[in-house]
Image: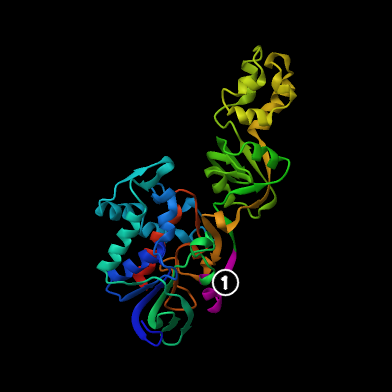
């Protein structure tokens, strides 16, 4: 299309990810003429790469408690009106085989491309005009919205911003949505990477680097937040599901500390008391419950002595060091490695029922660009589907 051309429609959805696709589909089912714009060459790229290419498309247990938001009530309406079961029905209607992994996480048996193709097929049914490689240069509002794009001028009654956060810039993430919100006088909360691996301070860093590749089922705590899943030691610090989860709760990534219980299923103090007469060394005893490399990395001189030879006070200190393994955090691996972005469009600026701006009629914000962050495990996709669906009912 030449840059001098001009088209008119009811709704422009900006952002061809999960939320944008769902909004376009939902609006088109109401008979709205929808143009879906994506500035990269690929629609649904975050869907494609998620879940190791199998897309953890929702979670059986999705509920408002699995989300972080400055206003914890904001998310209730959208999640109730388009639930995980609604999305599962759509997946099943396309005969896409899926399975549950741990903790209610649902993945495609085949490829994440099945989810993208399903959403594009729904767009086709609704005659959505899907435009990859189309960038928006400016948005103005007079009686209607006027968008200057690389495809020419587009006029619309409603604009839905579904441009995501800052995470994974290598697939096209940008601050576009925040810029538009600010342009229209809306408040944007500070952002930081979330669901992200953490860097640690010395001397713990030396230990983590030595243990790189070792995984351990653990209970990770920071203030009131607590997650029980695997942790993974890396050359730079810590990763793994429990670490990614807790990362979303850190107010900052420096001069802070997390607490890790490396043996959440047992009371090591009690075990030492029970086995007080054992001639087994502490190290060999612990290797029944922990990876050998981890025991060796945490060992003090006392680990080479038998349980029976050690004072109770020393055994209790060893138990404490494993149940309350304190790790000083010194940064994160940033937006490059973060699965999502915390912060964004202040939910006080939006109607929880419609996702429409309270200040600018016809302007909607959905998905990750909004200050709503889900846990790891399909929750962020569910927020995308739910928020996209409700916006699609009103745009």
Measured as percent of width and height from the top left, residue 104 is found at 40, 44
Measured as percent of width and height from the top left, residue 123 is found at 30, 67
> Does the segment drawn in magenta span residue 188?
yes
Residue at x 39%, y 64% (from the top left corner): 43
In the rendered structure, the answer to whether residue 246 lies left or right of residue 386 reads right
Label 1 CA crowd tier, 10 Å (few <14, some 14–19, many 20+): some
Residue at x 30%, y 53% (from the top left corner): 91
Depicted 236 relative to depicted 171: above or below: above
Residue 134 visible within the image: yes
Q: Quadrant of residue 298?
A: top right
In the rendered structure, the answer to whether residue 38 lies left or right of residue 298 reads left
Measured as percent of width and height from the top left, residue 285 is found at 61, 20
Rendering colour mode: rainbow
Residue at x 39%, y 70% (from the top left corner): 132
* Range drawn in magenta: 177-190
Q: Quadrant of residue 188?
A: bottom right
> Does the segment drawn in magenta span residue 162?
no
Of helix, strand and loop, which one carries label 1?
loop
Depicted 225 relative to depicted 273: above or below: below
The residue beneath circle 1 is 187
Depth check: give the residue in front, 297 or 78: 297
Measured as percent of width and height from the top left, residue 117 is found at 31, 59
In what quadrant of the picture does the C terminus appear?
A: bottom left
Q: Quadrant of residue 261?
A: top right
Depth check: give the residue in front, 282 or 233: 233
Depicted 266 relative to depicted 209: above or below: above
């Amino acid at each position: 299309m030449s840059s001098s051309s001009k088209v008119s429609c009811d709704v422009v959805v900006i952002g061809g990810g999960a939320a944008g696709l769902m909004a376009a589909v939902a609006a088109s089912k109401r008979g709205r003429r929808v143009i879906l714009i994506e500035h990269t060459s690929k629609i649904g790229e975050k869907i494609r790469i998620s879940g190791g290419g199998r897309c953890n498309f929702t979670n059986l247990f999705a509920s408002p408690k699995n989300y972080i938001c400055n206003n914890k009530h904001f998310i209730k309406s959208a999640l109730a009106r388009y639930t995980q079961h609604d999305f599962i029905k759509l997946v099943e209607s396309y005969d896409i085989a899926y399975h549950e992994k741990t903790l209610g996480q649902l993945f495609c048996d085949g490829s994440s491309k099945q989810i993208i193709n399903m959403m594009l097929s729904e767009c086709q049914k609704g005659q959505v005009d899907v435009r990859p490689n189309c960038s928006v240069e400016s948005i103005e509002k007079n009686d209607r919205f006027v968008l200057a794009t690389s495809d020419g001028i587009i006029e619309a009654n409603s604009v839905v911003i579904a441009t995501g956060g800052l995470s994974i810039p290598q697939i096209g993430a940008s601050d576009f949505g925040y810029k538009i919100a600010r342009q229209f006088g809306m408040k944007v909360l500070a952002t930081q990477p979330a669901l992200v691996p953490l860097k640690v301070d010395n001397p713990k860093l030396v230990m983590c680097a030595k243990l790189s590749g070792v995984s351990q089922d653990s209970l990770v705590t920071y203030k009131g937040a607590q997650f029980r899943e695997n942790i993974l030691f890396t050359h730079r610090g810590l990763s793994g599901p429990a670490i990614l989860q807790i990362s979303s709760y850190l107010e900052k990534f420096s001069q802070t500390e997390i607490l890790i219980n490396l043996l959440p299923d047992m009371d090591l103090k009690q075990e030492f008391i029970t086995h007080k007469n054992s001639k087994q060394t502490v190290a060999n005893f612990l290797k029944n419950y922990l990876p050998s490399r981890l025991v060796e990395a945490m060992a003090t001189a006392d680990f080479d002595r038998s349980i029976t030879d050690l004072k109770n006070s020393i055994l209790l200190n060893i138990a404490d060091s494993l149940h309350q393994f304190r790790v000083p955090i010194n940064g994160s691996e940033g937006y490059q490695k973060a699965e999502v972005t915390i912060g964004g469009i202040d939910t006080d600026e939006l109607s929880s029922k419609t996702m429409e701006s309270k200040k600018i009629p016809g302007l909607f914000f959905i998905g990750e660009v909004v200050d709503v962050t889900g846990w790891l495990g399909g929750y962020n996709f569910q927020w995308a589907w739910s928020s996209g669906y409700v916006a699609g009912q009103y745009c």
